[in-house]
Amino acid sequence: MSAPSPPLIKTAAVTPSGTPRTSPRRDAAQPLVRVRALHKSFNHMGNVLEVLKGIDLEIQGGELLSIVGASGAGKSTLLHCIGTLDLPTSGQITLDGVELTTLSGQKLARVRNQSIGFVFQFHHLLPEFDALENVMMPGLIRGDARKTMELRAKEVLGEVGLSHRMTHRPGEMSGGEQQRVAIARALTLEPKLLLADEPTGNLDTATSDAIHDLFFEINRKHSTTIVVVTHNPSFAQRMPRVVSMSDGKVVGDQRGTLASS
């Protein structure tokens, strides 16, 4: 196994030995995420299905934006490519100054673990573990000390309003509470980039609004860059930036919408 490369971003985390994790500085003028001429195709029953058709997109550090469009527009595929969960057919994706499309699978896994947080429509919590253990899991997988991760997980669960539910398993919590645990898990390693794919698609209106407000609070408090794919028009309209997609292309990029409206 090759030696691990340095992490891409600076975080407050430390190695198991206590040595701070550091990374190269990023030019303040350089976007956190840069997508250039991105194409993604699939082979389906002998036919080539082109899902992304030359996407160009830049996302600045600290931005809060939504990606909207009809089903089949390519929103989730774009999000998965940015998050390295899927590989593009061609084009470039740069995260924090590092070209992702040239990295090996092992290095991409390291990027996902240290630099990107994910929240999906289905929370994907481990049913046999309680909320605290689920939130600790990314750090334990990375090799961080259990005590360090326990303290961090308690802190993040407190931020999402679940200090009183730490010892409860997913089956003992409501859908909204489970999604809050998933958000806490995504934040536990302090990622610079949080990607959310229809995070409130299975929740009622009141619970969805509470989750949406939580995203705004996370962005305000930690300057976390957050990209949300959503079909919820009221949520999208509150975002400071709305990127519209249709037929695998970006067809609109609206800025200036007040998040507090």
Image: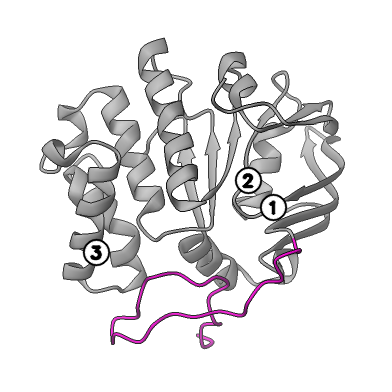
Mark on residue 60?
A: 1
Q: Quadrant location of the C terminus?
A: top right
Q: Residue type at mark 1?
A: Gln
- Residue displayed at 65% across by 35% down: 76
Q: Please provide the residue range marked out in magenta.
A: 1-30
Mark 1, Cα crowd under 10 Å, few <14 / some 14-19 / many 20+, is some
Q: Work out how far the residue at label 3 is from the one at label 2, CA to CA, in angstroms.
A: 27 Å
Is residue 244 found left or right of 138 in the rendered image?
A: right
Q: Relative to 181, is 82 on the left or the right?
A: right
Q: Residue at x 30, y 39 (%)?
A: 160
The amino acid sitting under disc 2 is Glu
Mark 2 is surrounded, within 10 Å at the Cα level, by few (under 14), some (14 to 19) or many (20 or more) other residues, namely: some
Please name the colour scheme applied to the rendered image: one colour
Residue 212: in magenta span: no
Picture disc at residue 149: 3
Side of 253 where 108 appears, left or right: left
Taking the magenta stretch, the answer to whether it contains residue 29 is yes
Instruction: In this rendered view, identify the residue nearer to me: 144 or 60.
Output: 60
Q: Position of residue 7 (x, y in %)?
A: 53, 75
Point 65% across, 42% down: residue: 79
Nearer to me, 29 or 210? 29
Which secondary structure is most common in the magenta stretch?
A: loop
The numbered mark at residue 257 is none
Which class describes the residues within 10 Å of circle 3: few (<14), some (14-19), or many (20+)? many
Q: Is residue 125 visible?
A: no
Tell whether label 1 touches label 2 (CB within 8 Å). Answer: yes
Residue 156 in percent (x, y) is at 28, 50
Q: Position of residue 69 (x, y in %)?
A: 73, 22
* Gap in angstroms between the C-alphas marked 2 and 1: 6 Å
